[in-house]
Image: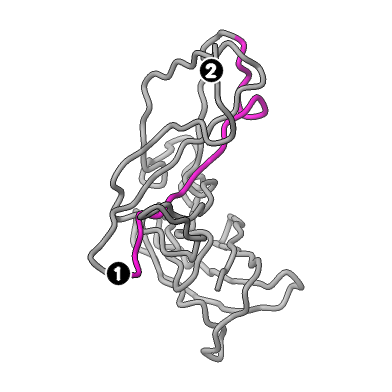
Amino acid sequence: MGNKTDAVFDIRFLDTKTEDPSDHPWRMRYTINHQVVPFDGHWHHVKIPLAWFADQGSWDNNQWYNPVGAFDWTRIDRFEIVAEHKSLPDVFLTFDNILITDSLATINNKKEADDMAFRIVPNPAGNYAQILFSATSQEVITIRIYSVTGNLIREWTIHPASGLNSIQWDLTDQNNRKVKQGMYFFSLFSGTEHKTARISVVP
């Protein structure tokens, strides 16, 4: 809930800085503005998939580091709400019941096919990408990666376990060659469902 229609702020996750001297507390952010939720003084329910967060980079030791796809979702240090875009004088924002849930593990009894949703982390990816998806049956699933020109880059045929599944993509094509920087599209097929997502590969 807020009182200014032109308010804009970020929500972000920071991962844990490791002992590796090349590592930093990387950020994943999502920007909230009036296009996401109207700041009209009323309560609104906002649901933001983690796949919508973008790799922002890192501020560490008084120096800025551009994103390299190194954000680690398994080592989250904290969640922040920050006014990164501009100061917000005379603005009040009220938040309640902030939850982080795994919707992929939730069974929808009305339409089990909805559980075949999937996400890709990190995104953008620099060294690898983890493909997470859920299945409510052991029906064969095919995952394909395409370039923006429609060329098939990689393909997997999977006999999934019921529940949450994952595979790792090392950013190579079918011939084990590293793919180029750019945008790629994922397609996930089962006998009755077709889901799509996209990923950015960075240097």
Q: Residue furthest right?
A: 149
Query: In the rendered image of this protein, does residue 158 appear above or below residue 82?
Result: below
Q: Main secondary structure of the magenta part?
A: loop
Is 24 a magenta residue? yes
Residue 134: x percent and y percent? 41, 54
Query: In the rendered image of this protein, does residue 20 appear above or below residue 123?
Result: below
The amino acid on which the numbered mark 2 sits, given as a three-letter code, is His
Is 182 a magenta residue? no
Residue 147: x percent and y percent? 68, 73
Q: Is residue 194 visible?
A: no
Q: Residue at x 56, y 83 (%)?
A: 173
Q: Residues within 10 Å of mark 1 (few under 14, many from 20)?
A: few
Residue 80: x percent and y percent? 39, 35
Q: Residue at x 40, y 56 (%)?
A: 137
Instruction: Mark 2 or mark 1: name the one nearer the start of the chain.
Output: 1
Query: In the rendered image of this protein, does residue 88 appear above or below residue 149?
Result: above
The secondary element bearing badge 1 is classed as loop
Residue tagged by mark 1?
21
Viewer-proximal residue among 148 and 106: 148
Q: Which mark is residue 101?
A: none
Residue numbers of the magenta segment: 21-40
Q: Which mark is residue 44?
A: 2
The secondary element bearing badge 2 is classed as loop
